[in-house]
Image (cartoon, rainbow, N blue to C red):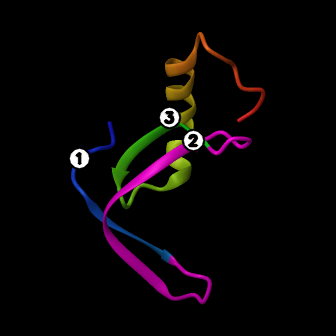
Amino acid sequence: MYITFPNWGGKLDTNDNFIKWFGWKMHALVDNASGITLSYMITPANVVDIDMAEPLVQKLKEDYEELFKPSYY
């Protein structure tokens, strides 16, 4: 799906300095109460977090369909 090759990512820090990096990024869906990672995906560093939100929720539903149903996401 998203895993191809590592790539450049970047953003502005709190002082408006542009910082960049090369590699991979892990997007994680974490239980708020326990801090346990429930679902994750690895993408090139340039993939934006919000673009992975829906795929992570869908993966959670597929992986844990019979075990539990979250109250909210």
Badge 2 amino acid: Leu
The amino acid marked with disc number 3 is Pro
- The part of the chain drawn in magenta is 12-35
**Which marked residue is nearer to the observer: mark 2 or mark 3?**
2
Which residue is denoted by mark 1 in the rendering?
Answer: 4
Specify the farthest residue to the front: 34
Q: Position of residue 68 (x, y in %)?
A: 66, 17
Name the residue tied to disc 3. 55
Residue 18 part of the magenta-drawn span: yes
Vertical relation: 32 (above or below) 46? above
Q: Position of residue 59 (x, y in %)?
A: 49, 27
Identify which residue, 40 or 45, lies in the foreground: 40
The amino acid beneath tag 1 is Thr
Residue 47, image x, y percentages: 41, 55
Identity of the residue furthest to the left in this view:
5
Q: Residue at x 35, y 49 (%)?
A: 43
Question: Considering only order in the chain, which callout, 3 or 2, is on the residue closer to the N terminus?
Answer: 2
> Count the marks: how many?
3
